[in-house]
Image (cartoon, grey):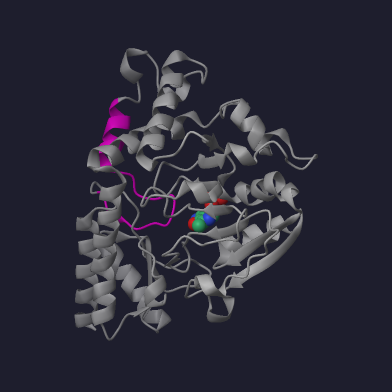
Amino acid sequence: MNEKRVFNFAAGPSAIPEEVLAEAGAEIMNYRGSGMSVMEMSHRSKAFLSIFEETKDTLRRLMKVPEDFEILFLQGGATLQFAMAPMNFITRTGKADYAITGSFAGKAADEAKKYGDIAIAASSKEKNHTYIPAQSELKIREDASYFYYCANNTIYGTEWQYTPEAPAGVPLVADMSSDILTRYVDWSKYALVFAGAQKNMAPAGVTVVFVNKAYIGSALPYTPVMLDYAAMVKGDSMHNTPPCWSIYMMGLIMKWVEKMGGIEAMDARKRQRSKLLYDVIDASSLYKGCAEKGSRSFMNVTFVTGDPELDKRFIAGAKEVGIENVNGHRSVGGMRASIYNAMSIEGAQALADYMVEFEKRG
Ligand code: PMP
């Protein structure tokens, strides 16, 4: 057994702060004198309801979420939101526009095509999704029900560095799975923001949805109740049994984020971590960054050596020094270091040092 914890650069599920794991461990048998584990509690119990409310309140406070947005804790991953968004919002005009900046945005558009007239507002496919289109390149119809984009493209390592502008009256819908809780959101522009929580917020099993209440209540008639935001809001995420354990863990992680200094601290940390790695790439004659400089992600640093065999040696060598999961997504290869909120500066520094050492070693 490996007694030592590694630096885990996995893209999701991902590293969780060690003190949160220790806290959950200490409470696992008997949650604060209740005589049972959170895993064993009724979701209607007083103890769990207080965990639930506190988690929601902390998240609302951290992200400055206004009261006209409801925060939901759902299941089905970010992927289910690819269907829920159109099923709930397409009825406004029957049309919606999508920016295709990676495979998850593409999947979301494919899902939406089942429910309405979907147009591609911009696509970075011709350059293998190595960049984010500029505002001037976005062709958004004035009668679109919404404009959809994926704020951070986990596989390609690109991130929108600006909040897109849509024509007046067209709200934004965004997949923020991999950059949620790393910056503030201008809520006035959005109908919906969602995130699979297993990167920056919690273990897998819960999907966080921020839905603007002004846009709910007109889902397609055949929408299953579990996919209707209005029903989820009405039941306060408890139309059925919610993912209690993941919500509890999210609560601990939210408190950790708050203790660390909130979004400002997460924003500063992401810049520090990613700079350590991009600086090595930019100074190197071995590593090539995959994303164009102006589109680089703070959360997923993607790079290659240009030689797949050397990439393999890099990944195997990293493992030997306690640096795990730096392989690129199976669809693109190369390397990817996912550096979400729980990744320490020390972890990013260890990877940067290894990269320099590997290049020197040749
Ligand atoms: N969107 C993005 C940006 C992602 O990175 C992922 C998963 N890596 C998904 C959607 C899919 O999320 P889930 O597995 O929670 O359905």
280 lies left or right of 196: left
Which residue is more in the foreground, 139 or 114? Answer: 139
Quarter where residue 25 is shown: top left
Q: Which residue: 57% across, 52% down? A: 173
Residue 321 appears in the picture as rendered = no
Q: Which residue: 48% across, 29% down? A: 244
Q: Which residue: 19% across, 57% down? A: 346
Q: Is residue 23 magenta?
A: yes
Quarter where residue 170 is shown: bottom right
Which residue is more in the foreground, 276 or 228? Answer: 228
Q: Is residue 285 above or below residue 185?
A: below
Q: How many marks?
A: 0
The image shows residue 256 at horizontal and vertical percentages of: 28, 38
Q: Is residue 44 above or below residue 296?
A: above
Give the quarter of the figure containing the C terminus. Answer: bottom left
Residue 14 appears in the picture as rendered = yes
Stretch of the chain drawn in magenta? 5-26
The image shows residue 10 at horizontal and vertical percentages of: 39, 56
The image shows residue 79 at horizontal and vertical percentages of: 60, 51
